[in-house]
Image: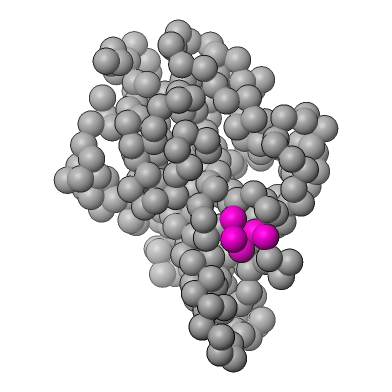
Amino acid sequence: MTISLKDQVSEAEWQLRVDLAAAYRLVAMFGWDDLVFTHISARIPGPEHHFLINPYGMMFEEITASSLVKIDLNGNKVSDSPYPVNPAGFTIHSAVHQAREDAQCVMHTHSLNGVAISAQRDGILPLSQQATLVLASLGYHDYEGIALNEEEKPRLVANLADNTFLMLRNHGLLTVGANPADAFLSMYIFEATCMIQVKALAGNRELIPIDPAIVDGVKEAAKIVTGGLFGGLAWPGLLRKLDRQNPGYAE
């Protein structure tokens, strides 16, 4: 049993821990987890470059606010934890966090639909409303093997650029956000886009591509639809869903 850290960390860090633990459990609930092998990281508010990441070996559906591991930019633990950190996992995340001040949360998945589309040369096709949101802010990064090579970081950062979505070829999906709520909603849209494309291509019928002009205007339209809140619009409802189906993340 993990001892609660609520009274041992700042209020801002505790709230981030709760939201990040919820994001892990939601990834499991929606079926995007890959046992223990992907990651969501978040930067802790404050001058130190400290981050929270999953305890390696714990299932996403088990993660709590107190079990998250605090690490530095090199992936070294800066607080006590019986769990290790996956070095391959934080190679990708540290590159993004270091390059993008706005990327306070980085979410990476190996979902079946995401990996399937990442293996297709054409990548994301303009086949759905969800796809227009992705295509408006999407980069691609070619596969270079399991992410252990520090030399890969500049290429990954360059491919992400200032986008919200990154397709890791033959590997999976990545989203960034100002907080776990934003990163999660972006991943929900990314995953839905891939699932729809898999199903559409399987239908073996002529497909109707969306006009590129519509894609060009979708960013502004999305702000109107979400009232500028983006992930924050759906987040309270998602937490209520977790409270009903898998409570305990805020411990």
Question: How far from the left and from the top, in percent, is residue 128?
Answer: 52, 77
Q: Is residue 117 visible?
A: yes
Q: How many marks?
A: 0
Given residues 41 and 170, the one toward you in this image is 170
Q: Position of residue 157 (x, y in %)?
A: 74, 43
Say which of 241 and 84 sits in front. 84
Between residue 130 and residue 58, name the one nearer to us. 58
User: Is 118 included in the stretch rendered in magenta?
Assistant: yes
Residue visible at 65% across and 59% down in the picture: 118
Most distant residue in the bottom direction = 206
- Quarter of the rendering occupied by the N terminus: top left
Residue toward you, 171 or 210:
171
Q: Is residue 78 above or below residue 95?
A: above
- The residue positioned 61% from the left and 77% from the top of the image is 126
Q: Residue at x 46, y 20 (%)?
A: 69
Q: Which span of residues is magenta-colored?
A: 115-119
Q: In this image, 91 relative to 226: left or right?
A: right
Q: Is residue 95 visible in this depiction of the protein?
A: no
For the stretch drawn in magenta, the main secondary structure is: helix
Residue 2, how many percent across, how many down?
30, 15
Residue 231 within the segment the image draws in magenta: no
